[in-house]
Image: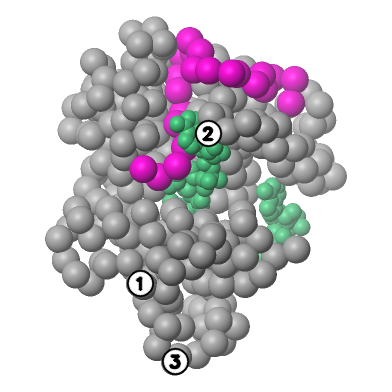
Amino acid sequence: MEFEHVLVVGAGQMGGGIAQVVAASGRRVSLHDAAPGAVERGIDAIRKSLTKLAEKGGEDPDEVLSRIAPADDLVAADLMIEAIVENADVKRAIFGRADEVLPATAVLASNTSSIPITLLAAATSRPERVIGMHFFNPVPVLKLVEVIRGLETSDETTAAISALARDLGKTPAEARDLPGFVSNRILMPFINEAAYVLLEGVADPEAIDTIAKLGFAHPMGPLALADLIGLDTCVAIMEVLHEGLGNPKYAPCPLLRQYVQAGRLGRKSGRGFYTYA
Ligand code: CAA
Ligand code: NAD
């Protein structure tokens, strides 16, 4: 399986980063988003990131950007990487449409943080070619791709997506399709617990994050990390863990829910646990 032309669906922080690393590998990218102006904003963010990397000897930003074309709708490609909102119904609708638009030989991948790959695959007629290709934020910097096999994902699809991840300069690690896979089964309860610690008044946000940064040598504390990920995404992931594992310990912290209700989504809305310029 060769992936010369990749359709990235969703031009938010993850879709933009994915389009960037795929284009930087020399491949052609079509970038689609449903929200007006989102692709343009995504391309601006890609330009900023490429400019930082060019200062350190990376490729000319214009060269990489010339391989990314905005797309008004889904288009035929060898591979789709979906990176839209963490909502199972919305993702299933995209997988159903992609199954009609992309050739039968194409692979349909999702960057989902937690939604079952098997559920997305069931919205298509090619479940053996549906897979989780889970990048980490910020995509141009973090080296992991968690590769998630749905119930029907073939060995050939898994091998091709792992090879692509390596070709993008990432290290693939395989996980089974159980709620939260490996990464968010571990990370999200940590973030959720930090929100409970704040809610219960055990410490203020700065103290909570300082303890994780200096005490555990994490590059950033759990509340700053939640702001980077997006609090809406954190709540959506906790809901999948809660429902999928049936254990009350995974219930999203009420403070996280309240911030999302208030529109405090983290960095992307300018305010979450912290305020951003
Ligand atoms: N593009 C290009 N370069 C970037 C970049 C981007 N988007 N973001 C950061 N960088 C570069 C900076 O230019 C800087 O480079 P130099 O060291 O050469 O100067 C380097 O990365 C470090 O950045 P900063 O100096 O700005 O700040 P930092 O040292 O605090 O690093 C960070 C920022 C990379 C975000 C780091 O704090 C970090 O790794 N944090 C943890 C992130 C993490 O855990 N992500 C996973 C989230 S979970 C997830 O993604 C899965 C999910 O499903 C929710
Ligand atoms: P985001 O909010 O930054 O961007 C999502 C984009 O999807 C928006 O631009 C929105 O307009 C678009 N969109 C929504 N519905 C659409 C549709 N039907 N068709 C086309 N575009 C649509 O979100 P994000 O942080 O980039 O997350 C995207 C996905 O990546 C989610 O599944 C999330 O769980 C996953 N993920 C997020 C992170 C993270 O740290 N934020 C890390 C790994 C994986």
Q: Which disc, if any, is residue 10? A: 2
Q: Which disc, if any, is residue 202? A: 3
- State the image coordinates of residue 30 (x, y, percent, origin top left): 59, 20
Numbered range of the magenta stretch? 65-87
Q: Is residue 169 left or right of residue 65?
A: left
Residue under the image location 57 percent in, 67 percent down: 272
**Residue 147 visible in the snapshot:** no
- Residue 83 painted magenta: yes
Considering the image in quadrants, where does the C terminus appear? bottom right
- State the image coordinates of residue 33 (x, y, percent, origin top left): 56, 29
Kindly identify the amino acid type of the residue bearing the numbered disc 3.
Answer: Val
User: In the rendered image of this protein, does residue 188 appear above or below residue 206?
Assistant: above
Residue bearing the label numbered 1: 253
Residue occupying the far front of the picture: 262
Q: CA distance from mark 2 to mark 3?
A: 38 Å
Residue under the image location 45 percent in, 23 percent down: 80
At numbered mark 1, what does the secondary structure look like: helix, strand or loop? Answer: loop
